[in-house]
């Protein structure tokens, strides 16, 4: 199996994650993580998928034929490596140039003074009446020329930052699960507290561990007598009843649509990892197949209307 990172540029956000996710699934890949970011160029999509190396060309052909994608790149994904989006706006030297202010106007050179001609000698007639007072002429001052405001500094686009993946915080997960016997199914306050108490890089792995162990705990408690089911039977008899105790969920074929997930309310902050691993721990002992796979097709924290999980064996 190979992990690939898809970077794509599109004009609009609506339904983009769902549609690209469906293309990836149809090409034989499963979704690992995804992100959307607004940019002056358009909507930037980053998606990590996993699948057979031989399916890469099929995936690229599907993306190339998708009319909503303006351009895209597909490259191997390396965990912990921060890769900027190829279509993100970049601030260059020319963009950051601020023109200097206009030079202050210089005063014109003083005119050369010429000596006044000598007054002619004349006999003055002295008047006995006082002369009327002369009014001083008003002085006019020129207002200084306004200084042009500096050019606005360019606003750089928010960088695409992915935290370095860390191992799960097992003590925190075990402490939370120890309370399930008393609080289940009111577990979301505990899960929200868990994901905000661990390091950013350990958030996804801790939710995954909590989901898998929590799903196995629910199976042992409520469905231990159920075994040897087909995937379709396991969804109807185990997955749906267990999930409906937690959230509002609807089945559409091999997909489960979760409405208003309490773990997927923050932008670009998906909690679908918990539900995927919860179903794996719950259904693993119930189904005949050893190849059970549960993965998130889309998530409402990335703009989808609902969180969609696809199940296959």
Image (tube, rainbow, N blue to C red):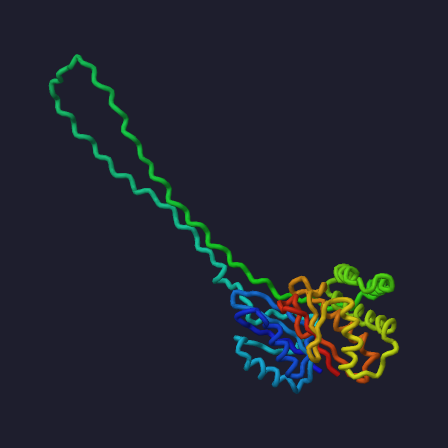
Q: Which residue is drawn at 80% across and 76% down?
A: 238
The quarter of the rendered structure image containing the N terminus is bottom right
Question: Which percent across, then down, holds residue 26?
Answer: 64, 82
- Residue furthest out toward the top: 128
Q: Quadrant of residue 130?
A: top left
User: Viewed as shown, does residue 12 lie left or right of 302?
Assistant: left
* Between 86 and 198, the one nearer to me in the picture: 198
User: Viewed as shown, does residue 215 lie left or right of 308?
Assistant: right
Q: Which residue is drawn at 11% across and 18% down?
A: 123
Q: Which residue is drawn at 60% across and 74% down?
A: 7
Q: Residue at x 69, y 68 (%)?
A: 259
Whether 271 is drawn above or below 65: the answer is: above
The quarter of the rendered structure image containing the C terminus is bottom right
Question: Which percent across, then down, holds residue 216?
Answer: 84, 73
Judge whether residue 78 can be spotted in this image. no
Whether 287 is drawn above or below 121: the answer is: below
Whether 14 is drawn above or below 289: the answer is: above
């Amino acid at each position: 199996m190979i992990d690939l990172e898809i970077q794509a540029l599109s004009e609009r956000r609506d339904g983009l994650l769902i549609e690209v996710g469906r293309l990836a699934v149809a090409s034989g890949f499963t979704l690992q993580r995804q992100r959307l970011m607004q940019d002056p160029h358009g909507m930037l999509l980053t998606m990590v998928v996993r699948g057979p190396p031989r399916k890469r060309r099929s995936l690229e052909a599907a993306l190339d034929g998708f009319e909503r994608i303006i351009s895209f790149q597909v490259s191997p994904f390396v965990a912990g490596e921060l890769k900027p989006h190829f279509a993100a706006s970049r601030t260059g030297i020319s963009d950051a140039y601020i023109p200097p202010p206009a030079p202050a106007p210089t005063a014109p050179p003083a005119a050369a003074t010429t000596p006044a001609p000598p007054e002619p000698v004349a006999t003055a007639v002295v008047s006995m009446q006082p002369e009327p007072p002369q009014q001083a002429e008003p002085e006019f001052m020129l207002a200084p020329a306004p200084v042009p405001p500096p050019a606005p500094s360019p606003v750089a686009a928010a960088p695409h930052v992915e935290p370095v993946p860390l191992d799960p915080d097992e003590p925190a997960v075990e402490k939370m699960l120890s309370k399930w016997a008393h609080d289940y199914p009111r577990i979301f306050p505990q899960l929200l507290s868990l994901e905000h108490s661990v390091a950013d890089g350990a958030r996804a792995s801790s939710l995954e561990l909590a989901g898998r162990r929590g799903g196995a705990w629910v199976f042992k408690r409520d469905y231990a007598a159920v075994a040897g089911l087909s995937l379709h039977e396991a969804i109807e008899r185990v997955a749906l009843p267990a999930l409906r105790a937690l959230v509002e969920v609807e089945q559409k074929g091999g997909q489960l649509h979760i409405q208003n997930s309490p773990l997927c309310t923050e932008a670009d902050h998906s909690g679908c990892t918990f539900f995927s691993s919860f179903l794996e721990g719950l259904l693993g002992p119930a189904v005949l197949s050893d190849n059970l796979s549960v993965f998130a097709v889309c998530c409402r924290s990335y703009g989808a209307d609902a969180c969609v999980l696809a199940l296959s064996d």
